Amino acid sequence: MSPVSNVKIDKILVSIIGRALKAFTDEMSLCMEKTTRSPILCEAKDFVTGLYDAEGRMLEQTENLPILSFSLSPVCEHIAKKFAGNIFPGDVFFHNDVFSLGNQNNDVAAFKPIFHGEILVGWAAAKGHMADIGGNVRGGYNPNATEVWQEALRIPAVKVVERGVLREDVWDLIFANVRLDIVQEDMRAEIGACTVGERLLNGLIDKYGLDVFEAHKLALFEASRKMMLAEIRSIPNGTYSGEGMVYFDGKHPGSEFTIRVKITVEDEEVLFDYSDTDAQTKGFVNGTYTSSASATLLTFLQMVNPDIPHNHGMTEPIRMIIPEGTLLNAAYPAATTFGNHLCPPNADAIIRALAPVIPERVTAGWNNLLCSLSSGEDPRKGDAYVDILFMGLKGGSGAMCDCDGYDHIGMIDASGGLLDQDYEMFEQQTPHTLIEHEYLTDSAGAGEFRGGLGVRTLYKVGSDDTQIVTFGDGDVEGAFGLFGGGDGGLNLIELRQP
Amino acid sequence: MSYKIGIDVGGTFTDLYLWSPDGELQSHKTLSTPKDPSVGVLTGIEQLGETKGLSLAQFAPQLGTIVHGTTVTTNATLTRGGAKTGLLTTRGVRDALEMRRGVREEQYNNRFTNVEPLVPRALRCGIGGRLDSTGAEIEALSEREVLEALEFFKAEGVEAIAICFMNSFANPAHEAAAAELVRKQMPDAYLSVSSQLLPTVRFYNRISTTVLNAYVGPILENYLSSLTGRLADAGFDGVLHVMQSNGGVAPPEVARERPATTLLSGPAGGPGAAVACSRPLDYNSAIVVDMGGTSFDASLVQDGEAAMYNESDIERLRIALPMLAITTIGAGGGSIGWIDDGGLLRMGPESAGALPGPACYGRGGTRPACTDANVVLGYLDPAFFAGGKMELDAEAATTAVLEHVGKPLDMDAEAAAAGMYRMINANMAHGVREITVKRGLDPREFPMVVAGGAGSLHACMIARELDMPTLIVPQTASILCAAGMLYSDLRHDFVRSYVTRLGSIDRARLDGLIGEMLKEGEGQLKAEGVAADRIERQVFFDLRYMKQYHEVTVSVPPGTATPDSLDAACTAFHAEHDRLYGYELQKEGTELELINVRVRVTGVTDKPSPPKFPEGQADASGALKGSRRAFLPESDCFGDIAVYDGHKLRPGNLFSGPALIERIDTTILVSESYAAEVDIHGSYVLRQKGGQQ
């Protein structure tokens, strides 16, 4: 890397480069939204795009669903080290492996190194939730899994394109283990988004020169770091503890687990220590290091100034201890597909810990996810259908000390980024008839400021061979109230026979 | 032959553009009268008459056509000043309107609240009765429940009613029956029926659009009554046309039926004017930028037509009628510069507005706005702002910039102002980029047409950022939308949903739908006095690959759905999909699905030819006012800049940047790498030096 110490910092250029990087990752995101095929990606926007420096440090991200956002930087760093000396212009790497910093098996990422001339200057990455990634069951959610191979094909960092040439053997090996053809298309879309990011970042470096870019990048990190430090400084020093409950590991009815966090704030640093969290389960209700770290970050980011530019500097003052073998960081070769959905109880623990300290910045508890997925043959078309009932799985956010919760935006890890299917498109694309989808009266916790409302969704099943899969929580413990506010209602799925 | 006027009513000014029988074109500006905008309109007309030596009573009868752009519906939506509206919808889904599919646009901001729905829950009534996805009745409409709801609406003093039932796009019977009851029970209420306004699949789009239409209906109706009344009193007996969001015009009767089509009535004139001023330079496409006091709009002309979106959002409310594609960002002359907690400079979105306004206005503003930076940079002459009508306080501008931006960044006022200027230009450049990238276009292939008073100081640097070689600042820049109204045609859009695989399409049904829409449109145009040989017809299909979620709209040659035109649509779809999204699946044989059929009819109007001035010499020294110290943005330093009097420049005059061109209504910066030339129509054309053109 060229020395940057002699470059004079133009403070205005720092702002301008920051603004440009945001536009670039947005453009990568637009590319994903418009070119992917699976509705999980193009409709629900369950993906993230980002740019990173040569060492894998985050330059900027567009985080549509934040829960998968904060594992890209660590994996980027991992690839840069693992392939050091073996990274060339035109390479593309794939990765999903949860035991080398992936967050969830189905969240498969593409990484493309960005070279400016001969010099590696950064990485472009895109990651989305793939409709299938092999394993025992279609779609990946396998409550019977006890080890990773029953859940998915593991893709440790692997080079699928070298110097612009597709490694067909590697490509075929991967996709021979995936059920649905659209996954190949969606991974091509990820590569496309990375190529867009590569071109844009190179254009920026061409314009200002590499030395200037490198120096101003560091200044940009520093500005974000300062903003985060200011936020942390405003929290009184001390150690604060909180708990969140996880019910049922998918195998043992009545089983319960506790997430315990100790948050230590010392001047300009905050440490989230999960050492006292319960041990991992024998089922698939287990977190991975980066899914849990993402959950921690996205919860904390909702308690600070939302204007902080998302880059390495923002995350630098935030430290975490998530010991291997706990529920939040299961040891190899545990099953972990449900890990992203441990975000809500993790958020509960953090909110409970910090509520007494920064009451004006926390929300009360959020509604947890309870999901149902129906599939079968549409008798009108003689064709298979699959539907995730997005409109039915979203409850409300917790209230704050001075404003109501937001109705029907889902669990905290979606935070309003996941859209309902349109009712009439639902009736076009499934054989079901929607009978009711309305706010559920009194479902929110009561108080001076109420929580966000949940919904009641009722539909008439229209196929004969229907299979309905359900998973999730919020059926034992509702969203909790704070400062005297009431709790939210419980989640419920009911099947009525005519 | 008689006079024709384009009138664009904005928040501060009412802009007028007059086309006289002798071909002369004339711009005029007068203050708006927000309480009843028709007062300002009449004042403007009267003032224009005076320039001809005519009293209002003499002038008004000579007006053949008035084309009018209004923001009354937009303002009613923004300020929640619309009619008290009741909603009749299907039992069980009355909250769809408020849920907006469960979105929260700012994910990390827990104090971000939902938009207030245009109809409160108590006035959203679920009615028994149900159609299935093909339009077949599952349960009969409960007329009793409709009547009960109407009793309640009457008691509540409801002024407008929206009707939107599930699957009514496939069968309007239930909505028609309910509408009949409304007409009987509440004949004075404004009525908006979804299957008439927007018979397309997607419930949320339809219910939101129908409610918006009802909500602004009485507002537009009152306004148009007031306007037509005043015009008639003045002796006007010509044709009044209202500018619609689709870039076409419609008579008041049609606008009253579909008031939601006027939500972008104001800016919709821009692209038409851009075509008129770029065509003489052999362009058929353009990017139009309009920088005002609080916001910056970018829109697009492609192949001579304004680019449209079939779905857009207004203040986070969905409207699914064809509207001008426009990207708006919070960057204007009033945008405030500030330093964030990380020590970085930001511009906007907060704006000083008209009050207190930028610090240099001397109305009590102390925080630095973009206009203050432009004063510090020497771009605006404090003594010649608005042609000298308003003196600017340069000292106040310098103090504001220094205190709030300079000191925190450890810079002097000039460096700080230069930073503000660079930053807001970068923001606007990303706005322009967004509108092209979303359509898979390359901004470098377009000229930039500059509108609005504030934009011309920034346009060069936006264009340079995007590598756009040509800019056009028309004489009418400060009233571009009013001018565009004189270049607009009568235009009506229709749409019907027909969800089917293309392989199993029923041609007779498709022909029937297209024929029905064409008949309605042609009938409408005939009633508006359009001769048959001036009617143009366009047919569009919304298509997608099977199991995709987003459609691509492609146009097919007019005529009915012959096998040829369907094939042409498919070919066009694959090509457009590839252009927009980088791939197509023709070879793979992936089947296509039709969702909507659209028809657009256009009645071509007479248009003025742009004014021509005698061509002169390249030497522009006759217009040179002198020079002053100002910021050279490409060299990043201050220097002497030549200042030209824009009103004295003549066609053929050619000079190199850096230079400033001062006019009463705008000041244009020609940066170092651009040269300016005045074309035969008086437009200032700025071209990158050493470029191809």
Image: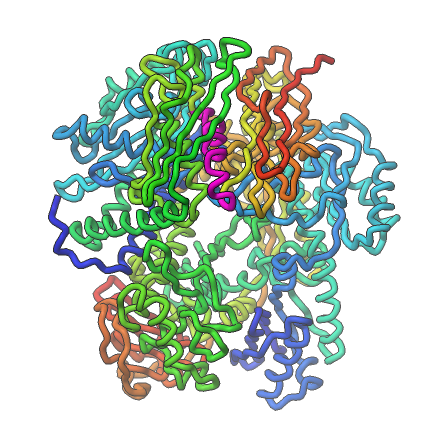
Question: At which x and y percent is residue A42?
Answer: 46, 33
The residue at the far front in this view is A238
Q: Is residue A360 rendered magenta in the image?
A: yes
Picture residue at 65% right of the left edge, 40% below the top: A447
Picture residue at 29% right of the left edge, 58% below the top: B467
Pick the front one: B295 or B253? B295
Q: Quadrant of the C terminus of chain B?
A: bottom left
Picture residue at 54% right of the left edge, 10% below the top: A253
Pick the front one: B522 or B422? B422
Compared to residue B424, the image places residue A363 above or below, namely above
Question: At which x and y percent is residue B165?
Answer: 72, 37
Location of residue A350 by image quarter: top left
Question: At which x and y percent is residue B95?
Answer: 68, 39
Residue A152 visible in the picture: yes
Question: At which x and y percent is residue B281?
Answer: 37, 66
The residues colored magenta run A340-361
Residue B106 visible in the picture: no
The residue at the far bottom in this view is B53
Q: Is residue B136 rendered magenta in the image?
A: no
Left or right, B682 with respect to B70, comes to left
Compared to residue B52, the image places residue B561 above or below, namely above
Magenta-highlighted stretch: main secondary structure? helix
Left or right, A484 with respect to A306, comes to right
Location of residue B254 by image quarter: bottom right
Compared to residue B615, the image places residue A297 above or below, namely above
